Image: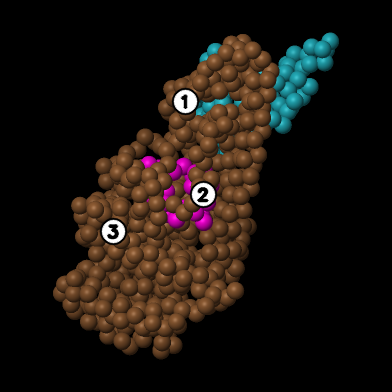
């Protein structure tokens, strides 16, 4: 985590693994958007040189991250650490798949 | 010259009306240079705002009519519409290219759709269709073209389409759309389920009908038997209009009728009438039609049209909705009755040459303990809130039934350990729809607490007839002596052990067969809610002793044609009497 104290902007980033069997398909994509929209921070998900905004359903639908993919989540903004943690938990929960 | 076509009737009722053919909007998207990009972007924002209002209204309407599960599709559309990156990309393209917004919208959405198209393994077809839907909605506004929305139909019509999406089906104006005919689909397809819930007569599986009809041409549709007649002769039209009138009049009479509880035969014998339903919202239709509970709650809709499995909690909430709506009346919940080929291909690219004889229903559930456990837990949890019965589909014999029941007992123990309440005495029964289950009905009757005969599949399996196959559909014959003997054998096996034997197939909802089924000893019939008043009326004319005698006679007749003729004769004689007696006036 980096703190740009002069700007009052925090950046939080981490690698997150896709654990659910079906990968980031339609429903997980919606859940990511719903989670991301709760935060003020800008949230980006990077995968294979593709960077998409986590508040964009269309972007997430083109991500193509299957089970076992390693994603980088980058949050910047006043609530960056919380946003990162929320997404970490969402991925860890496997999006509630049975 | 009238042309008859045979499809599969999936939602009963009759319609005679002109045709409209529905196809997705194909826009000619103009490209031109603009000088004021901000004005162009303002047009885009107005279109977004108006589309959002539309979607919010559809969401609210659908939630009220069919429940939030079916309204979820509009939430998905709203999420696409509100995508900030998508909106910005369109606006940015307008600014940088100084092009009109329609062109920008078209280009940006195409790029996304192409990228999604490359991700075949993620099964994004539904989202693909959703994005097209949203783009169409915006284009309509931007191009100020007459919207082709099905919700905006203004005259009574029969709607013919290759297929209808769930959002199109729920958006239909049920006052004006008199019937639906589609080329593809199955009884369990989403649009068939929704048509039944909306009580719009529907026939599916009529190949290339969109090419054969001319818009504006008249059509006859019988959603009960799957008949579609193109360009009907005046006589045919008249006959079907009469049938439609009778159907609607009786429906209206019975809608105002307070008849509740069992149907009562002329000699006082009670026959229990129950509703076949798929959506929680349909329980109300059933109760309004006078049903005593739900005889068949099909749970497939929870599993269709999605990439994942419904979780226990989601299922529990759906089952609880039905149990609550049934208001203390019994609800028979059938466990999942589809197969690997129908469940989302996200689980496996599984295809079968012959799914009817394949890996489906109870076979599939026993092979997927996690799926089965979640469903049984959800049903059992709902059983704490009202009388619930559990029915296993496609049972082929005693071993299979025992395996399913033992699995359920194990699930009960787990719930007990977790201190989760459920009805420990929940009755468990088998759907009898495979000939081997008929032949072992005497053994099954020792294990089951009830039977329900699924006549549709039983007839298909025992006569080896696929009724969607036009060449042999006429061989599907409820009056076949083999079928009647099977029903008799199952009822006798049930009666010998004192367990209930219901019939929940189409035969139960057709007044023509009421006398035969009752004569064979069936005293519980479960059917589509719209059929209940008709069957109730037919039963009121019957007498136990003569029905019994008729059934014995039918069992001894050696030709299905003779059985059918006798059945029809007796039925016509009774209905002639009924029709000559005045139909009671509807309450104002």
Residue B442: mark in rendering: none
Determine the colour of chain A.
Answer: cyan
Q: Residue at x 45, y 48 (%)?
A: B191
Would you place residue B273 above or below residue A44 in this image?
A: below
Q: Chain letter for mark 1, please.
A: B
Whether residue B303 is visible to the viewer of this picture, yes or no, is: no
The residue drawn where x is 42% and y is 73% is B534
Q: Residue at x 69, y 30 (%)?
A: A37
First-in-chain label (3 vs 1): 1
Q: Is residue B468 magenta?
A: no
Camera-nearest label, 3 or 1: 3
Q: Which mark is residue B154?
A: 2
Is B475 on the left or on the right of B63, as rendered? left
Which of the two labelled residues, at mark 2 and mark 1, occupies the earlier sequence position?
1
Q: Are marks 3 and 1 on the same chain?
A: yes
Q: Quadrant of the rendered structure where residue B95 is?
A: top right
């Amino acid at each position: 985590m980096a703190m740009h104290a002069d700007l009052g902007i925090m950046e939080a980033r981490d690698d997150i693994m896709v654990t659910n069997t079906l990968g980031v398909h339609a429903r997980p994509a919606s859940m990511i958007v719903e989670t991301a929209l709760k935060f003020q921070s800008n949230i980006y998900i990077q995968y294979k040189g593709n960077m998409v905004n986590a508040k964009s359903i269309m972007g997430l639908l083109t991500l193509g991250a299957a089970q076992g993919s390693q994603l980088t989540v980058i949050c910047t903004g006043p609530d960056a650490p919380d946003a990162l943690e929320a997404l970490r938990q969402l991925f860890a929960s496997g999006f509630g798949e049975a | 010259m009238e042309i008859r076509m045979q499809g599969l009737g999936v939602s009963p009722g009759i319609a005679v009306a002109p045709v409209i053919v529905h196809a997705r909007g194909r826009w000619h998207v103009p490209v031109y240079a603009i000088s004021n990009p901000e004005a162009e972007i303002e047009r885009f924002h107005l279109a977004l705002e108006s589309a959002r209002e539309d979607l919010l209204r559809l969401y609210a309407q659908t939630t009220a009519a069919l429940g939030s599960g079916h309204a979820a599709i509009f939430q998905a559309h709203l999420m696409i519409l509100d995508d900030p990156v998508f909106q910005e990309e369109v606006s940015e393209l307008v600014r940088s290219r100084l092009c009109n917004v329609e062109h920008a919208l078209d280009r940006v959405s195409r790029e996304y759709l192409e990228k999604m198209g490359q991700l075949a393994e993620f099964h994004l077809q539904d989202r693909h269709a959703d994005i097209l839907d949203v783009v169409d909605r915006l284009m309509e506004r931007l191009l100020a073209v007459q919207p082709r929305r099905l919700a905006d139909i203004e005259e009574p019509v029969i709607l013919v389409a290759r297929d209808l999406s769930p959002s199109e089906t729920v958006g239909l104006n049920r006052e004006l759309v008199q019937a639906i005919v589609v080329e593809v689909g199955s009884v369990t397809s989403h649009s068939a389920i929704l048509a039944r819930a909306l009580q719009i007569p529907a026939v599916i599986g009529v190949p290339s009908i969109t090419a054969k009809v001319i818009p504006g041409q008249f059509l006859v549709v019988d959603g009960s038997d799957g008949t579609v007649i193109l360009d009907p002769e005046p006589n045919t039209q008249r006959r079907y209009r009469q049938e439609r009138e009778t159907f609607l009049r009786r429906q209206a009479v019975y809608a105002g009728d307070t008849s509740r509880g069992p149907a009562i035969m002329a000699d006082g014998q009670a026959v229990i009438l129950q509703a076949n339903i798929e959506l929680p919202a349909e329980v109300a239709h059933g109760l309004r039609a006078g049903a005593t509970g739900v005889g068949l709650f099909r749970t497939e809709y929870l599993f269709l049209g999605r990439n994942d499995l419904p979780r226990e909690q989601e299922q529990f909430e759906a089952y609880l909705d039905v149990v609550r709506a049934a208001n203390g009346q019994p609800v028979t919940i059938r466990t999942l009755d589809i197969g690997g080929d129908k469940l989302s291909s996200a689980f496996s690219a599984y295809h079968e040459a012959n799914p009817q004889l394949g890996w489906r229903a109870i076979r599939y559930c026993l092979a997927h303990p996690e799926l089965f456990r979640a469903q049984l837990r959800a049903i059992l949890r709902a059983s704490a809130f009202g009388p619930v019965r559990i029915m296993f589909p496609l049972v082929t014999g005693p071993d299979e039934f025992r395996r399913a029941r033992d699995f359920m007992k194990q699930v009960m123990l787990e719930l007990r350990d977790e201190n989760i309440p459920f009805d420990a005495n929940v009755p468990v029964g088998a759907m009898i729809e495979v000939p081997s289950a008929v032949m072992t009905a005497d053994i099954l009757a020792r294990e089951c607490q009830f039977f329900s005969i699924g006549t549709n599949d039983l007839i298909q399996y025992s006569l080896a007839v696929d009724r969607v196959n036009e060449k042999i559909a006429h061989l599907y014959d409820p009056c076949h002596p083999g079928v009647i003997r099977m029903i008799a054998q199952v009822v006798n096996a049930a009666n010998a052990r004192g367990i209930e034997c219901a019939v929940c197939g189409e035969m139960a909802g057709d007044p023509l067969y009421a006398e035969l089924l009752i004569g064979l000893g069936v005293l519980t019939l479960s059917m589509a809610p719209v059929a209940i008043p008709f069957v109730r009326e037919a039963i009121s004319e019957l007498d136990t002793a003569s029905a019994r005698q008729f059934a014995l006679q039918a069992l001894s007749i050696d030709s299905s044609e003779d059985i059918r003729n006798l059945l029809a004769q007796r039925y016509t004689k009774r209905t002639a009497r009924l029709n000559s007696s005045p139909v009671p006036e509807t309450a104002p």
